[in-house]
Image (cartoon, rainbow, N blue to C red):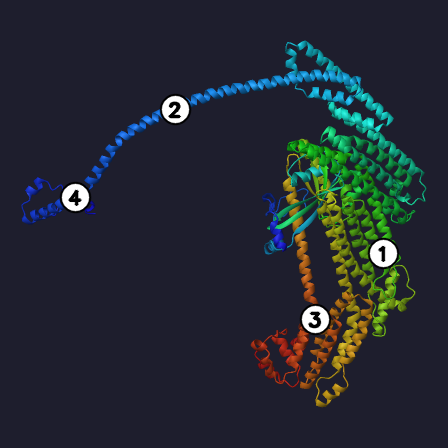
Amino acid sequence: MAAAAAPGPRAPGGDGGGGSSSSSSSLSMERIQSLTDLSDLEAAYGRLCEEEKVVQEELDALLEQQSTIENKMVALHRMGPNLQLIEGDAQQLAGMITFTCNLAENVSSKVRQLDLAKNRLYQAIQRADDILDLKFCMDGVQTALRNEDYEQAAAHIHRYLSLDKSVIELSRQGKEGGIIDANLKLLQEAEQRLKTIVAEKFDMAMKQGDLPQVERFFKIFPLLGLHEEGLSKFSEYLCKQVANKAEENLLLVMGTDMSDRRAAVIFADTLTLLFEGIARIVETHQPIVETYYGPGRLYTLIKHLQVECDRQVEKVVDNFIKQRDYHRQFQQVQNSMIRSSSTEKIEPRELDPILTEVTLMNARSELYLRFIKRRIVSDFEVGDSMASEEVKQEHQKYLDKLLNNCLLSRTMQELIGYYITMEEYFMRETVNKAVAMDSYEKGQLTSSMVDDVFYIVKKCIGRALSSSSIDCLCAMINHSTTELESDFREVLYNKLKQGFPATTFQDFQRGVTSAVSIMHSSLQQGKFDTKGIESTDEAKQSFLVTLNNVEVCSENIMTLKKTLESDCTKLLSQGFGGEQAQAKIDSCLSDMAAVSNKFRDLLQEGLNELNSTAIKPQVKPWINLFLSVSHNIEEEEFSDYEANDPWVQQFIVNLEQQMTEFKAGLSPVIYDTLTGLMTSLIAIELEKVLLKSTFSRLGGLQFDKELRSLIAYLTTVTTWTIRDKFARLSQMATILNLERVTEILDYWGPNSGPLTWRLTPAEVRQVLALRIDFRSEDIKRLRL
Amino acid sequence: MKSGVMRLVPPVSRDRIISQFPKWYTPEACLQFKEHFHAQVRTACQQSAGTAGLKLSKVVVVGDLYVGKTSLINRFCKDNFDRDYKATIGVDFEIERFEIVGVPYNLQIWDTAGQEKFKCIASAYYRGAEVIITVFDLADIQTLDHTKQWLEDALRENEPDSSFIFLVGTKKDLVSDAVCERTELDAIRFANEMQAEYWSVSAKTGENVKEFFSRVAALAFEQSMIKELEKTSGHMAQIGAGNLISMLSFASYVHFPSSLSCC
């Protein structure tokens, strides 16, 4: 630290004349000599002494280190000879390594040479083997051919074909080239001969229908490198079998009696037999193809088979169209759909069997195509396990093309196209019929038409579903949605529009007008209802039944949607439909579900209508009777009221009577909604008359009693809580029951406790003013 | 639960986010001239952003066979173009997700088959279409003549004035500019008669395809939002009116004499 501090003052090298120069080392002799002042001299001396002390300390420190340094030097000297030794050792080691390296190189080069020699040897052996094989093959082929052992011959040829061609070329250039050349020539000749023989024998076996022979030669083709030819020849044979069987079946069909149990679906059955036949062929011959031709070849076989399948399908479908008059029926349907009236309409029931048959045909085709697809895909998967992505895509493309472009699927698409129009017609006409034949049985909530219509819709969609075609199914769901939403809803809507007639004995005036309006509306509809006023009961009934119908419709739609959802999931899990099938179905079904809400809206409309035309006109006068009962009463009248209830009991009886009529005729859910509407109405109307009355203290008590029994009654008839609807009235009753005006403050504002006031301060004052014994000044003075 | 599921869906890709109202193709045949979303819709969107249920509109694409309906949709939805013609069987279906003014929105595009034999199937899907796109081939004037019939068929299944109509000429890359202009004049005349908006596009080059569908999405979205707003406001009014107790009428009844005396 001191040493470090010392140079500090030295550095500035001050030359200031003002005395106390700071530098000490530069305290040169001249400077000292030039000093004359004693104090200056003393200062210089002091500084020099300090400096000396510092230098002394430094020197001491350095001297202390001397011994360690000397020690180290000694150690270093001692190490000298050792280092020389190490150097010598290292040189020796290096020499050894170089030597070893050279040795290793020498050895390995020999090994390499040996390896090369070995390889050449192997090649030589291989070639010798090949040549021997060649010779052996040639001899073998000759003998095998002589013995008609074609498998053996083919095996030899196969061996020859799998020989390395370059090896053969090389051998030909050798010394024995001539012999080998001759051998080769013979072999090639044998190959050609074998090929022709096999082809001939195969054809012969095919002609004779000799399956073992056919299969025998079929196995030989791949040995000769004739995969494609073998497959095509073999499938030719299989096609012939398919064709024969199909022709037989078709002849059988043409001969079937119309009374046969399966006559209605005979063409679907024929197609089924055809498909089953092909499937069986694929099933039985796939192992042979796989073993002898390798994986990935099934596509070729099926492609050939599909051509025959298409041909047979065409025949069956042609016959179907001819025999069932499919096109003419379609034309007729189309005509009757365009010109909805007149001309001879085709009876929908007549279409029933043919529609079922078409869907069945399509379902079978879909099933068959799915089978083929699965088989080919799995075959390709095995064959393409090592192939590149491009090859896989190429194969996928082939497959799609085969499935989509085959005549079978095109024909089916065409049939389904016609089917949808006919099914739509069937549905619409049958629904119309169900509506026309609508009947109602006493004791039932709904009329026959709802069940019938939904049975029909379900049947039609179910049939479309059974076709296994997603497009067809979605199309029918859409048609059903349209049918329900527009046509059928319209029917119900029109019924509700006729309104609910008010009962004559309740209000004669109203009864007459409603009767007139009924007659009026029936006149407008072109049919005069002779039953006139007597039919009001029926009209009422019809209105209530329609309300029930609407509700059931809304529910049925949701049920139908759910059932369809699960049906579709089943269908899709079986692998039918494309990638977007689920989304398509979801979209169509959600459209259908939306219709359910439309029916709900319609129900609400109907209920409002019922409430305002049937309930309100009756309930209102009953409530107005309240006005004729004075609530400005004294003790005597109060006890009299207790004995002879002036209003509420009668009101409850009336309500009871009125509601029983609805309770019997409406479904519980609708009835509940209706009572809900009614209680709201009562609450509103009662409030109105309350505000027109005046009350004494006991009158308030009377009203409280009345309200309590009314609420008690209404609670028994509704399932929902009605307290909420009567909250305002209950609070008004509380106000009317007060002893003094100021007592309200015990319940108001911070004192309200759990009670939430539904009345505004102004309303509270208004109710308070109904008490004749409360002074208006007191009320005005209230601070609310 | 639902919001948890929603979050699993990857966000809408950047080019499907629409915040400005897309422009029309030609002012001579277009459905709306506005350049901004309806103010009411915009505020409703800002309020309900993210919370409202997924909105969806149905789009039906119709037109003659081989005019390029599927290609048009594939260019937009998958951004590819297949030179090979593959006839559509029955109907195909794509869902395209958008985000418009911050609200997730789906277009459900139904691609119908143009072949006559599929008309029965395809026509069953026309109902409830918010947008009808009639497609023709700019290089084949006959297909333009047929658009009217296609539109008529599609409209029959829908309530009148409930859907937007678009007329689209495809394969713009195949015709020279001069021919295109001449055909466009005819097409615009058709579009005006059909009350449709006209667009020329090319699925092969992708020209105008994105712009077109954005325009479709924006118009359909705005329409459905307006409808929803009307519905909810209507509902609320109904609930309020039904249950309110009219103390007011009583009050006016009380005040009546005084106002009379005033006169």
Instruction: Identify residue type, mark 3.
Output: Thr
Specify the amino acid type for callout 1: Asp
Left or right of A109, for residue A244: right
- Discs 2 and 3 lie in a common subunit: yes
Q: State the CA–CA distance, disc 2 to disc 3.
A: 108 Å
Q: Which mark is residue A340?
A: none
Q: Which of the two residues, A774 or A430, is positioned nearer the viewer here?
A: A430
Q: Earlier in the sequence, mark 2 or mark 3?
A: 2
Closer to viewer: mark 1 or mark 4: 4
Tell me where residue A358 appears, x and y as whole percent: 84, 43
Return the chain for callout 2.
A
Quadrant of image for the C terminus of chain A: bottom right
Chain letter of mark 1 equals: A
Disc 2 is placed on an element classified as helix
User: Which amino acid type is marked by label 4?
Assistant: Asp
Q: Which residue is mark 3?
A: A721
Which mark, residue A96? 2
Residue A59 falls in image quadrant: top left
Q: Amino acid at mark 2?
A: Met
Report, in whole angstroms, how far the alpha carbon at label 1 lies from the one at label 2.
108 Å
**Residue B23, x across and y down, in percent:** 62, 44
Label 2, label 4: how many angstroms apart (C-alpha)? 55 Å
